[in-house]
Image (cartoon, rainbow, N blue to C red):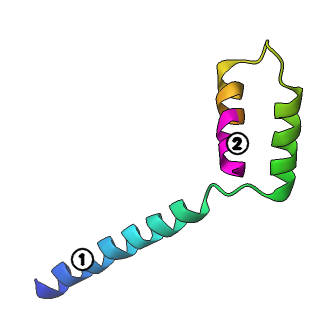
């Protein structure tokens, strides 16, 4: 019973560690993606949808 409980704890900690590692490295933009996003934001006009406006706002805050 002790070994099963220990194995369960180890598996839980390993899963949590992996999830934290993947979450910390998952959303980084490459330089090419940053350049494409900057170009899209520069060309954005009044017809742009709310999602695009929100993405550009988030991107401009990220650059600061």
Q: Classify 61 as above or below 31.
A: above
Picture residue at 69% right of the left edge, 51% below the top: 64
Q: Position of residue 49 (x, y in %)?
A: 71, 18
Q: Position of residue 47 (x, y in %)?
A: 79, 12
Residue at the far top in the pictured view = 47
Picture residue at 18% right of the left edge, 81% below the top: 4
Left or right: residue 14 versus residue 9 is right
- Identify the secondary structure beneath mark 2: helix
Q: The N terminus lies in which quarter of the figure?
A: bottom left
Q: What residue is disc 1 on?
A: 9
Left or right: residue 40 versus residue 23 is right
* Magenta stretch bounds: 57-64
Left or right: residue 63 versus residue 16 is right
- Identify the secondary structure beneath mark 1: helix
Q: Foreground mark, 1 or 2?
A: 2
Task: Label the magenta part by its dominant secondary structure.
Answer: helix
Q: Position of residue 61 (x, y in %)?
A: 66, 44
Q: Quadrant of residue 40?
A: top right
């Amino acid at each position: 019973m002790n070994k099963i409980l220990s194995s369960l704890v180890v598996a839980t900690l390993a899963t949590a560690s992996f999830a934290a590692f993947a979450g910390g490295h998952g959303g980084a933009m490459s330089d090419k993606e940053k350049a494409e996003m900057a170009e899209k934001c520069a060309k954005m006009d009044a017809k742009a949808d709310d999602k695009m406006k929100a993405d550009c706002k988030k991107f401009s805050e990220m650059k600061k």
